[in-house]
Image (tube, grey):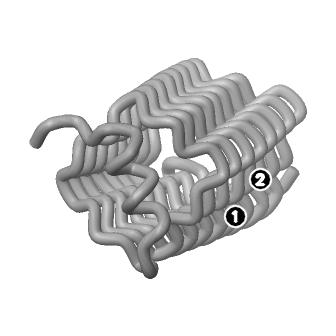
Amino acid sequence: MAALTPWQIYDLLNRKPPLWLSGCDLSGAHLKGADLSGADLRDANLSNANLEQAILRGANLTGANLSGANLREANLKEANLSRANLSAAQIIHADLRDATLNHATLVETDFSESSLRGAHLTGANLEKASLRDVSLSHAVLKGANLKNADLTNAYLSNATLFEADIEGVNFTGAHLRGAMKPGGDVYEE
């Protein structure tokens, strides 16, 4: 599908929600502050898009390409990002509570100061991701690849890291009490 013009995007954003944009090419689009609550963005191309402060609560972004996107302060609560590509995206101070990111590609993604409380990241690739000062309490990271990720000062209370690859992870100052280790034991301190 061809990329949408700025006018077409403006027209779509002013229609009655939820929007159906499955497979659309919105690469590089300026969508700062856009309300895309509940939108169907399956397999959409949002690479390098500006989604700063966008509202994507409950949106379906399954298989979407958000590589290099700016999602600073975005609301992605309860969004489905399964199998999405968010490599090198900026997801700083964003709300991803109860979001689903199963098998998502999150290589070198910056989640600094975001909330992923209760998020599902089963089988997600978080290699070299920045999770500094992130809340991951009650998050499920079963089988996730966290190689060389930065979890400095992250809050992982009651998170599940069962079968996760934590080789080279920086846990400096991280709160791990009650979290399940990759081998199934629980962190006491």
Q: Position of residue 151 (x, y in %)?
A: 72, 33
Q: Earlier in the sequence, mark 1 or mark 2?
A: 1
Quarter of the image for residue 55 reads bottom right
* Mark 2 Cα-neighbour bin, 10 Å: few <14, some 14–19, many ≥20: many
Q: Is residue 187 left or right of residue 18?
A: right
Name the secondary structure under disc 2.
Answer: loop
Classify 94 as above or below 41.
Answer: above
Judged left or right of residue 96, residue 93 is: right
The three-letter code of the residue at mark 1 reads Arg
Q: Are marks 1 and 2 in contact (CB under 8 Å)?
A: yes
Q: Residue at x 26, y 49 (%)?
A: 44
- Please name the residue shown 44% across and 27% down the image: 48
Residue closest to the far left: 1
Q: Residue 41, relative to residue 88: is it above or below?
A: below
Label 1: which residue? 117
Task: Give the residue at x 77% y 32%.
Answer: 132
Q: Position of residue 139 (x, y in %)?
A: 61, 62
Badge 2 amino acid: Ser
Measuring from the top left, give residue 162's x and y in whole percent: 48, 55
Q: Between residues 1 and 128, which one lies in front from this camera angle?
A: 1
The CA span between labels 1 and 2 is: 6 Å
Which residue is at the front of the view, 26 or 158?
A: 26
Residue 49 spot, x, y in % from top left: 46, 33
Identify which residue, 120 or 175, lies in the foreground.
120
Residue under label 2: 135
Callout 1: helix, strand or loop? loop
Q: Which mark is residue 88?
A: none
